[in-house]
Amino acid sequence: MSILNKILLIVVIILVVALGAIIYWQKFGFEKPYWAVYLDTGDMYFGKLNYFPQLSFSDVWYIQRNPQDSQNPLSISKFERVFWGPEDKLYLNEKNIVWKTKLKSDSPVLNFIKNPQLLTQPQPRQESQSPQSTSTQQ
């Protein structure tokens, strides 16, 4: 086999693997996880973290303070619905990030993001129940 044939064979194999990956991704896809990012300004954002070409969030949500509402002093709002009309993409400066964490699949915030039609805001998760508060069914 000549060198040209070997190179062509390698290129064909790479193209077949790439085509297979693209078809698989289009058919089955994958869902990017949601992350929470806390900035040194005190703002917290939720969204799908992207690293390329620049650190950014897509499907962005943020915590909004509601000082007039004593029952719900905080709410979660879609970033693109802010009155000044930004796109649904937020570019992040790594120097301003205090911490970031991936949200669990059972996170109340993630449940709200996936079901924004819910009128209630996410409630804090109860860690454990005391034995006195559990009931048994007979």
Image (cartoon, rainbow, N blue to C red):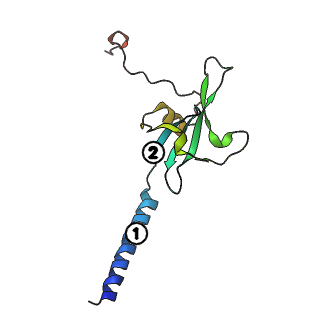
Kind of residue at badge 2: Pro
In the rendered image, residue 84, in percent from the top left (x then y), is placed at 73, 42
Which residue occupies 63% across, 17% down? 70
Please give the name of the residue rendered at 40% of the width and 69% of the height, measured from the top-left corner. 18
Disc 2: CA contacts within 10 A as few (<14), some (14-19) or many (>=20): few
**Res 25 → quadrant:** bottom left
Mark 2: secondary structure: loop
- Marker count (numbered): 2
Residue 125 pos. (x, y %):
44, 24
Q: Nearer the viewer, residue 75 or 39?
A: 39
Q: Quadrant of residue 7?
A: bottom left
Residue 127: give x, y in percent of width and height.
Answer: 39, 22
The residue depicted at 58 percent of the width and 39 percent of the height is 61
Quarter placement of the N terminus:
bottom left
Tell me the tag on residue 33: 2
| Cα–Cα span, label 1 and label 2 | 24 Å
Q: Horizontally, is 114 left or right of 3 in the view?
A: right
Q: Residue furthest top?
A: 132
In the structure shown, which secondary structural element does the residue marked by tag 1 occupy? Answer: helix
